[in-house]
Amino acid sequence: MIKKVILSACLLISFVSFAQQGTASPYSFFGIGDVRFKGTLENRSMAGVAVEQDTIHLNLENPASYASLLQTTFTVGGTFATSNLKTSTQSEKAQRTTFDYLALGIPMGKFGASFGLIPVSSVGYKIFTDNTATEGLTSSQLEGKGGVNKVYFGLGYKITRNWNIGADAQYNFGKITTTTLEAVTGVQNSTAEVNTSEISGMAFSFGTMYQQKVYKKISIFSSLSYSFAGNLNSDNTRVFSVQGDPDPYTQAVDPTKLKLPNKLSIGLGIGEARKWLVGANMTFQGDGQLENYYNKMNNVSYQNYSKFALGGYFLPNYNSFTSYMSRITYRAGLKYEKIGLIVNNESIKDYGMTLGVGIPIPQSFSNLNFGVEFGKRGTISSDLVQENYVNFSLSFSFNDRWFVKSKFQ
């Protein structure tokens, strides 16, 4: 059954992932866009806490976790995002439905492997400047779309019962297109500039996880992962056109060398496996070199990214035979992020709260997961935009035993 589900989902999502516009944030103009990937929904519902060596859920934040899988696990997730964008004088609403990830994990004794497709960042904005009431002034429309995706392959190894290590390799690819339309009041023809960047490059990461029982059923969980800085190649094209002119002008633009920043994530938690967990994660990331020729601005600079998250889960009784409600997992978390962007001398920050539930599918280890995230990013100070957002997410985690020879026909 799981094999049929995987095939159908792969065919559908491979198309959807390239067609979607995954954000409505004006801050996605900068760098390679708005960073999308926040982990699987199980971890996102705990604000990103991912410290336990889970046996039935994929942890895409640390490749060492793959070695703990006991069943083949296929997971896929998506989000319906709503946001209210406001400045000191006006506000607008936006909605998006997006694909978040698709991944497969396979246990292999002391080893575990995983591969999948994940949107890394998205560009999606429309900004209007209306000066049509004043003769000689320019009105403009800025629009951006696209983003960067990655396919990855990772391998984990269980050194001891409590200690895992792992590594993965990612191939990043995507296209970003920005369009600028300008019209001068009183002048008949408008002009258009279209910039297209084809992005590709490799990246690598490794991780380790360790757990230790400290009192009866209580254990300490720890996680460390590190992503190396990676190079991205951006092949660029710029096209100019004038309204009514059938022959646009294509300008050759030199390729741009971008650099993904290195990233360190450290997590620590305490709890009883398959019962409860309270944990914290800290993530630190360099500023990289992701500015391209079309989005350089004098009032914008970049700084190191950082994130602090606190979260956990509670599962009343995972093996209850009499109460279905006792087998539902309840998750919650809080987060604080500095997204690494400074505009008009203001560091852009993101505050959020997450809630979620994991609903088991009867007679299996598979489950449905629902999550909601409330947050605020940016500020109305310094002529900037504040985003108040609510994200509703859904994921499926299917579990099955593969490569097991039947004894009975």
Image (cartoon, helix red, strand yellow):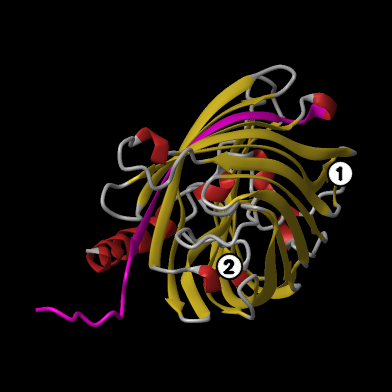
Residue 207 in view: yes
Compared to 198, does 86 lie above or below?
A: above
Q: Residues within 10 Å of mark 1 (few under 14, many from 20)?
A: few
The residue at which mark 2 appears reads as: 65
Q: Is residue 397 magenta?
A: yes
User: What residue sits 47% from the left and 81% below the top?
Assistant: 109
Q: Residue furthest left?
A: 409
Q: Is residue 35 left or right of residue 12?
A: right
Q: Position of residue 326 (x, y in %)?
A: 41, 36
5 vs 256, nearest the viewer: 5
User: What residue sits 71% from the left and 17% below the top?
Assistant: 89
Amino acid type shown at disc 2: Ser
Q: Indicate which label's residue lies in the foreground, 2 or 1.
A: 2
Q: Name the quadrant containing residue 320.
A: top left
The residue at which mark 1 appears reads as: 299
Q: Position of residue 344 (x, y in %)?
A: 86, 37
Compared to 298, does 132 lie above or below?
A: above
364 vs 353, nearest the viewer: 364
Count of picture labels = 2
Compared to 395, does 72 lie above or below?
A: below
Q: Name the quadrant containing residue 129.
A: top right
Q: Position of residue 210 (x, y in %)?
A: 69, 67
Segment tinted magenta in the rendering: 383-409
Q: Residues within 10 Å of mark 2 (few under 14, many from 20)?
A: many
